[in-house]
Amino acid sequence: MNKTLDAKYDHHKVEQEHYKTWVEQGYFTAGDKTKDPFCIVIPPPNVTGKLHLGHAWDTTLQDIVARYKRLQGYDMLWLPGMDHAGIATQAKVDERLKGEGISRYDIGREKFLDRAWEWKEEYASTIRKQWAKMGLSLDYTRERFTLDDGLSHAVRKVFVDLYNDGLIYQGERIINWDPEAMTALSNIEVIHKEIEGAMYYFKYKVVETGKELIIATTRPETMFADQAIFVHPDDERYKDIVGLHAINPANGEALPIMADDYIDMSFGTAVMKCTPAHDPNDFALAKKYNLSMPICMHPNGTMNDMCGKYAGMDRFACRKALVEDFEAAGVVDHIEKHMHQVGHSERTGVIVEPYLSKQWFVKMKPLAQEVLKNQEIAEQRINFYPKRFEKTFHQWLENIEDWCISRQLWWGHRIPAWYHKETNEIYVGMEDPQDQENWKQDEDVLDTWFSSALWPFSTLGWPENTDDLARYFPNDLLVTGYDIIFFWVARMAFQTRYCMKNRPFKDVLIHGLVRDPQGRKMSKSLGNGIDPMDVIDHFGVDALRFFLTTNSTPGQDLRYSDEKVEASWNFINKIWNASRFALMQLGDAFHLEDIDVSNASMIDKWILKRFNEVLENVTENMEKYEFALVGNELYNFVWDDFCSWYIELSKAGLQSADATVVTAARSTLVIVLRGIVRMLHPFMPFVSEEIYLSLPHEKASINLECWPTKVDVTMSEDEMVAVKQLLTMIEAVRAIKVDYNLKPSMDIEVIIKDEHDVLMPSDANRNAILQKMCHATWIDNAKDEEMAVRPILHGTLNVPLAAIINVEEEIAKLSKEVKRLQGEIKRGEGMLSNPNFVNKAPEAKVNAEKEKLEGYKAQYAIVEKQLEEMEKRR
């Protein structure tokens, strides 16, 4: 039984009815082995909060592909899941505990982890509700979490294997340190921002000679950990002091003056202090010359006992106090403002501290080289859409640095390494040491991206040889933003190559970022964020989805616009109303088996032929992920060809006395409308389901339907041209009636000429439609009189002016206009000839009056000529 469509489209009512049924009926559950498989795994959102507009865009693009592939007959697996998001989630739980007046150290690691799991369950539930509200066709039976038992097992295996292969090592290196989260960060978790700082020039006294050296630094607070002073060996200014010592004004220590060709003689004073534990370049020099590497700062960014009276001060408070003391002591030579790039933590936003620390690293060069080598093999390469992003991918892998994977957190995958309490032996393995009393596990956890990098295959059951892994790996498609090509895409590529000897996915569709209407990135500080759930409440999810996926080309950013979402809502209304018209024409007795277009009219055949053309273009662009092109094609076809033209033109056939003609018109309506809703279904799942169920149908849901196929329709090129010409005739008649202020219902006669100005004989079928659509009759006899002429396809449409104009009325109207313009010209000339006005009025006012006068004169010339022409016809 067909549903009935309400008189008005109500997205609240339409969207709340279907999703639960779809999930319960298993429409999104994969596993039909009679079909070819297609797999997408969702980029797992962090369980740190609600989904934002970027998530809505990302997941809608995936859902479009998933629904399209189901309609095409694939066994479609779209696997959902979420990421534990180590630093971000721990920060949120810490904040919640702080609100309760406690910290994680008060409750201990185990109870903190219990609270983190509570957070995860709370926000995972919110995310699932948002997925449902967005209509995502996810297979919830296979949902995964990066900290679930299966993924934890996979993570441990990869760590152990990489360690045993010599690709994971532990070492002391200068790393990026987040003093607020108190953890190491990888290089790509650091955002560099240009900020105004200062370059401080301080005086260092040479012990042996008493002379002063001027040395510049941007970070005076690290001076307590200085170990040497370096100059260039070829610098004539300083050759005589190499081997001597200079006093560190921060603590009075004598620092050796050394020479190395690393020093840039053109920068500053060409004298550099060396702080090995707080600068990566200084660290390299210290390794070369076997210098000590003391650390003068606590992990929380406060100064330690090396710093004397400054101990316990925040690093930036120490900087301020130290410089003030130096100024009082005459140590400051001068201070310059200095714009420089400063690293900030991507997660907490604080300035990152370069910090000597013992961490775990992945040796990246050999892993990256394997990926790059396989990008040259057609069946192993990852295909990027748009292709230009492959260059970004290549560049990062070619210039890759070792990856710091340890994090000083409690929430995450605990590193499977243990230290013997007596021998300091390290054990790394799948199983915990049997002698638990003598072994202590590493306190650190792994970088969140370590587990996310295994997502394409760990979610399918690896390292077990599961049926899902055999069937759905490698994945067919990944959809993600260009901002995480480094973070995630590249890491999935090398981890998958290492573990699976394969590519993680065949295609990667890259999209941009959603920006505000002014093009700014959305952020809390700007207060310009937009909650997709609010947009859905106002306009409906189908309107939001259509806007998000059809208003930007692949890889480009998207500007959010309420007006454009509303335009999508209007488009849905257009389809809704067209469907209601069709249902009124069909009645309750028309069924799919009644479809018969053997007696299709020229108009029926035209829309069916256009449908075939649109279907071909839409299918081609769906395969290339060109959803904006698909959206434009469907919008124009539905709005213009189907609604504006065919529905109006079909009324003649629908009201025909010939039953076969009526059947053909009804059949055409059903065929085209069923095809439209199936093509739109990936973009608009809810309204397409509602309309589908109201039309004659054989499936319980549009989710079970097939992608449309071309209609068998025969139409010659001449017939196609004839219809297209007819449409331009109707447009020309309507334009003439507007131009000459004629009522739309006024009957007029028209004469058609071809491009050679030869009279075209009237055509009965097209004449009937002209009369129906615009009250125009196509006649064959062309009188020798003046015509109103409008261009049409391959010719002109001509209307005898005498038939549409009352000469006396026109003369009276034009005479009145001439008098009015004469009056305006006289008034303007009088005003501009008045010295009092010209000399005393504001210049802008005088110029405005001059412009008005010129305009009136131009109008007068035109009207006067029209009046002369009319008077000749008397």
Image (cartoon, rainbow, N blue to C red):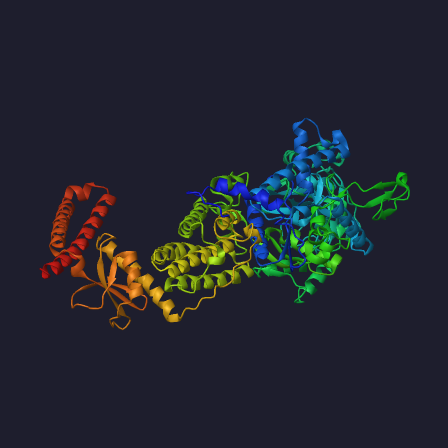
* Rendered image quadrant of residue 705: bottom right
Spot occupied by residue 23 in the image (x, y as percentages of width and height): 61, 45
Task: Please give left or right for residue 673 compared with residue 268 in the image.
Answer: left
Task: Please give left or right for residue 373 compared with residue 852 in the image.
Answer: right
In the rendered view, would you say 20 is above or below 633? above
The residue shown at (49%, 58%) is 593
- Residue farthest top in this picture: 101
In the rendered view, would you say 213 is above or below 673? above
The residue shown at (38%, 63%) is 601
Spot occupied by residue 456 in the image (x, y as percentages of width and height): 69, 53
Which residue is more in the foreground, 269 or 134? 134
* Rendered image quadrant of residue 369: bottom right
Viewer can see residue 681: yes
Which residue is more in the foreground, 202 or 156? 156
Spot occupied by residue 816 in the image (x, y as percentages of width and height): 12, 49
Spot occupied by residue 429 in the image (x, y as percentages of width and height): 84, 49
The residue shown at (40%, 52%) is 585
Which residue is more in the foreground, 831 or 753? 753
Task: Please give left or right for residue 564 compared with residue 466 in the image.
Answer: left
- Residue farthest left in this picture: 874
Task: Please give left or right for residue 490 compared with residue 851 in the image.
Answer: right
Viewer can see residue 318: no
* Image quadrant containing the C terminus: bottom left
Number of numbered tags placed on the structure image? 0
